[in-house]
Image: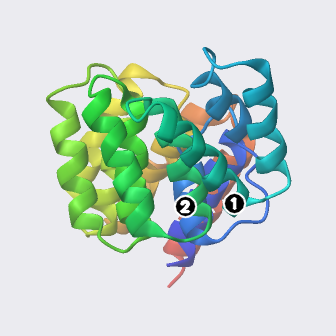
Amino acid sequence: MKCALRLWLAGLAACAALGACTPAQHLLLAVLPDGTIPTLLSHLERESDTNRRRVAELEQAADWAGLVKFADDNLAKDPNNASWWLVAGYAHSRQKNHARAIDCFQEIVRLEPDVPDGWNFLAQEYRAAGDTQRAVTVLTRAQTVLRDSPVTLLLLGESYSDLGHYEPAARAYRQALDIDAGLTPAWAGLARIHLKGGRMVEAERIARAVEKSNPPLAAAIRNDIKAAARP
């Protein structure tokens, strides 16, 4: 639906500048609120400046094959390094090699089950590959391990919403917002569900709640309320 797409894009635009990406890449990058390079490098903080600089150069050049090789070379030396599995998985995802990316993100979950990023990337990659039910399974499992991860709950809400399971989606969005009231895509998702159910008053309440912090999102919600109210 155009309404849902507009709300989701408004949320992403306010959360991060993602550039020109395919839908699958949008799904992956949506879990990087601080940007791609800062997130990748934050996982490589124990690596040498030379390695960190090389990762940044390859990413900025969109040399995904080169980034895969660089990660694989480092994994050959240290196969239990979750940070290099993240770099490899990200590069495979940008190449739309979903099966290989999933393998990489599963390694992160195995090595660091208490770190949200591994679960989030794994779930998003399943969504990008078209297996949203598997994403729900991953994110539900993550809830038994993680505590207070608003992005994980956001992704659970998005996955349930994709499947048309709107009540559990709304519950996940609300749980995410209880932890982080500034999580724009969760507000957008919740407004989208209210509009699907014809609950214009509830959608307007969300528009008022985000009006000061995110005027574009508030305006998008109100435009969709008007569109939904037309005979």
Question: In the drawing, does residue 85 fall left or right of residue 70?
Answer: left
Q: Quadrant of residue 92?
A: bottom right
Disc 2 marks which amino acid? His
Dot 1, crowdedness within 10 Å: few (<14), some or many (≥20)?
A: many
Residue 195 appears in the picture as rendered: no
**Mark 1 and mark 2: Cα distance apart in space:** 7 Å
**Nearer to me, 97 or 50:** 50
Image location of residue 86, percent across then percent down: 50, 41
Image location of residue 31, percent across then percent down: 53, 42
Q: Quadrant of residue 95?
A: bottom right
Residue receiving disc 1: 64
Dot 2, crowdedness within 10 Å: few (<14), some or many (≥20)?
A: many
Image location of residue 91, percent across then percent down: 60, 55
The answer to whether marks 1 and 2 mark residues whose Cβ atoms lie closer than 8 Å is yes
Disc 1 marks which amino acid? Trp
Residue in the image at 50% along x and 85% along y: 231
Image location of residue 181, percent across then percent down: 48, 25
Mark 1 or 2, nearer chain start: 1
Residue in the image at 67% along x and 28% along y: 41
